[in-house]
Amino acid sequence: MTIFSRLSRRAEALRRRLGLSYDQILGIRFAANVGISTAIVWSVLQFAQNASPLLAVASMVAASDPQPKEAHKIFKARLINSLVGCAVGLFILLVGGASVLLLSIGMAVTVLVSSLVVRIKSMWLQAPITAALVIGTSIVHGSAAKGIADGLHRVAEIFFASLVGLSVSWAMSKIWLIPEGVD
C-alpha cells in the first residue's frame, strides 16, 4: 500500500467521522490546491525580472478547480481567450498605437471576436482583460513598444500561474483520492 493510498484512506475516515459531504471535502482539497499553487507561483515569480506575483496568483485562482477535468476546461478556455485578447491588443497597438480611444475599440472588438467567433462562454471575460493588459500598459508607459513587452510579460505570468493551478489540481486529485458521490 502506497503512502498516498494510506493518506486517502485516513482522509476518508476523517471525512466520515466529521460528517463532511463530497462538496465540503472538495472545498477542503481546493483550499489545499490554492495554498500550494500560491506558494509555487509567488516563489517562482519572485525571481523573475519585473514580475507581478499578485496578478499571477489571482489568475491562478481563477483557473483552478478541485476537479481536474473542470480545471482543464477552465485552463483551455483561459488560454484561447487570452490568445484572442493578446492578438487583438497587439494588432491595435501595431496599427493605431496606444490611446484610450483605441483601448475602448480594442476591448469591444475583443469581446466580439471572443463571443461571436471563439464562443467559449465560460471565459469571455478573459479576452478583453488580456487586451486591456496589452493596450493599457502601453498607455500607462506612453510607449507602444514598452506596452507590448510588458503586456506580453504579464500574459506569460498569467499562463504560468494558470498552468500551475491546473497541475496542482491534477496532482492533488492523484494524491488525495475522493470517492465521487460520497455524501
Image: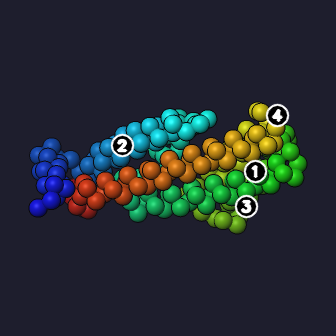
Q: Tell me the CA gap for discs 1 and 2.
A: 32 Å
Q: Label 1 crowding class (10 Å Cα cut-off): few <14, some 14-19, many 20+?
A: many
Tell me what residue is drawn at x 65 percent, y 57 percent.
Answer: 83
The residue most toward the right is 96
Identify the secondary structure beneath mark 3: helix
Residue 73's disc number: none
- Residue 91 lies, in percent from the top left, at 80, 55
Sooner in the amino-acid sequence: mark 3 or mark 1: 1
Q: Which amino acid does label 3 sit on?
A: Val
- Relative side of 73 to 154, left or right: left
Q: What residue type is labelled 2?
A: Ile
Residue 36's disc number: 2
Sooner in the amino-acid sequence: mark 1 or mark 2: 2
Res. 84 image quadrant: bottom right
Sooner in the amino-acid sequence: mark 3 or mark 4: 3
- Residue 124 lies, in percent from the top left, at 62, 55
Residue 113's disc number: 3
- Relative side of 145 to 95, left or right: left
Q: Is residue 62 visible?
A: no
Tell me what residue is drawn at x 71 percent, y 44 percent.
Answer: 149
Location of mark 1 (residue)? 89
